[in-house]
Image (cartoon, helix red, strand yellow):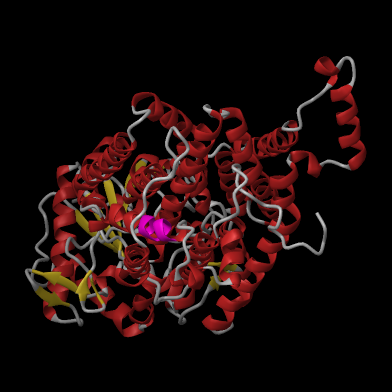
Amino acid sequence: MSARRAPTQELTTSTGAQRLAALDGYRGLFVVLVLLYHFGVTALVGGWVGINHFFAFSGYLITRLLISERARTGTIDVLRFYRRRAERLVPALVVLCTAILVSGLFAGSANRHRDAGDVLASLFFVQNWRLISQDDAYFEQVGNPSPLRHAWTLGVEEQFYLLVPLLVVILFVLFRRSRAGRFVVIATLAVASAAWTAHLARSGVDFSRLYYGTDTRAQALLVGAGMAVLFGRDHRGRLGRRPSVPVTQAIGVVGFLISISAFFVVGPRSEWLFTSGGMLLFAVGAAMMGLTATDPRPMLINRLAGWGPAVLMGQMTYGLYLYHWPIHLWLSPLLDALPLLVSVLVKLAVTTAVAFVSFRWLEVPVLVHGFGVLLPTAVTERLERARRGPRARRRALPVWWVPVAAAGVLALVAATVFTRPVSREDLDVPPLVASDGTFTAASPPVSFALLGDSVGVSLAEGWQASAYPGVEMSNQSRIGCDLIDAPMIADGSPMAQDSSCATWRKEWPAKVKEAGADDLLVLTGAQFIGEHEVDGQVVGGRSEAHAALIRRTLTDIEQQAKGAGITHLQVATMPCREVDPDKLDPSLRQFAGPISDPANVAWVNDTVTQWAKGEGDGAAPTPGVSRDLLDLWEPLCSDGFTPQVNGVPLYSDTVHFSPAGAASVWTWLTPRVVEASRTGP
């Protein structure tokens, strides 16, 4: 391409039509909002819903292309469709995966192992199901989040793309002359997806299952597809009838207001989005914007949405989204000392620069000229001569072998790293307290379960079974679930918990029993500091009612544990922290101050100590179960807060333990768990 041309001058849709400037403008706006949310802009608390808008846009664009091809040629070239999808997605994805594997050389082997698995899942477009299998929580950045966590969206879209050509063919076979019939089928499928999502949400499945599932996300893609069916071409190539210009503009304005409101009115884990059709509502809002944006008639709203910089950002949406998350993770340690505004602007600038370079010199050339543009000129000419020669069929290789070979090499490297065992060297840390020395094998053996929230999950990541012979640990901690069975108060209102937390509270005793544990270690969490709504009243502020709530919670856990065969319950006190709010998810930053307050930590630990002694309302001992207090505050905080001990960083985000920090804590906890297990009930 000529250097003087605009980056997308030659970039057209597969139908040869000019790109839709207004739709690109909307995409540019919303991708920037999603980036700002991930970079830590707290005002955009509902930014996690923004991905839903892109699913609706993608469903519309892809279905529109297929319908136009069907109307123009009478058929759909499925292989060409898949090749075009590969040309759009694979080059930049291969570059990113390569960068992540290279960066893994400088990280601990535990991260290399995880990242290599994510590279494999991303290259095969199944990262969403991998995250579901790991119970990944979108709002909890426990330890070091994967730089490919965000690639789940590619999995959802590509899985939809596998099926949508067949869906379009079937629709035109069954309803060749009936546009309404085709639309009703698509609309029914979208509603069915929303209903299925509501069913899953009410049945108590994990939030990750609702958030990452292809079946739960299909509703937005199908809404976009429905708009393409309703207003796209029919079997004779005629476009659908659109409303008048004033009505179309009004539809666009309403759709924009619905869509933009998601960023400001939806909180984290707003269950109504899944239980009551909220995702479907916002998908319809995005489709309303799309209806207006794709209307060729002159409209003020389209002129505004088609603002040049927004259009360019929209055309670079894929690269902006693809590169922003690892850039955020890689730059955060370097920018921690800067104000949030400066940090966000730097990350946005770096992301935009990288995305533009990728778009201008990688993505657009491949889209315009195909994969062959990635090969040296001499290789391309040789392949061309081979294709034209007398023995072309036997000698010529199709150009699509370029991405296949690149992805294959990456997959091979990733598989090699992924299947190798995680090195112990990264978790081999000196004892937290030097006097503890080397651990002596437990005899008789000890089996215990760990119960906590996301901090418990981060602690479990540092457990090394081989370092503690004779000791078996079963982790029953749960990300995002409060030990206190009552809504926590945030900004004056109760926070909705993941519906799976209720299931977790019911099921953990059975899992503890199944694991054969005799002891239960309860990890005191930051939720003990926060206010909760109990029987319509706010309980907190270090009041006696607050203390009684904590004691009753621990007693309830103890009674459930007894039913699971537990004879010893050990509770660890809460360590001190100095929480950096900029390192937390925006939805959690309001808790940074209370968690960092030494007076709050001391009060919680005093309350837990009283309970361990059987003192206070709700602390009556459970017959047959002994209680022990493990004062984790002492080795970590007796000399004040310290971010590291013996050169080992304790925390990853100033709240959750780092893998090495967790391994260090276990050197202190494990001998005391074993010692406490020797006491009789």
Q: In the depicted view, which residue is nearer to us: 664 or 1?
A: 1
Looking at the rendered image, the quarter that the N terminus falls into is bottom right
Q: Position of residue 179 (x, y in %)?
A: 34, 37
Q: In the depicted view, which residue is nearer to us: 314 or 600?
A: 314
Q: Position of residue 154 (x, y in %)?
A: 52, 46
As drawn, is 363 to the left or to the right of 255? right
As drawn, 65 above or below 559: above
Q: Position of residue 111 (x, y in %)?
A: 59, 51
Residue 592 falls inside the magenta stretch: no
Can residue 344 be seen in this snapshot? yes
Predominant secondary structure, magenta span:
helix
As drawn, 245 above or below 444: below
**Identity of the residue drawn at 82% across and 62% down:** 3
**Identity of the residue drawn at 64% across and 67% down:** 352
**Identity of the residue drawn at 30% across and 65% down:** 524
Q: Position of residue 241 (x, y in %)?
A: 36, 49
The number of callouts visible is: 0
Q: In the depicted view, which residue is nearer to us: 305 or 411?
A: 305
Q: In the depicted view, which residue is nearer to us: 299 or 489?
A: 299
Q: Quadrant of residue 536?
A: bottom left
Identify the magenta region.
286-292
As drawn, 29 above or below 193: below
**Identity of the residue drawn at 45% across and 32% down:** 163
Residue 289 falls inside the magenta stretch: yes
Can residue 443 be seen in this snapshot? no
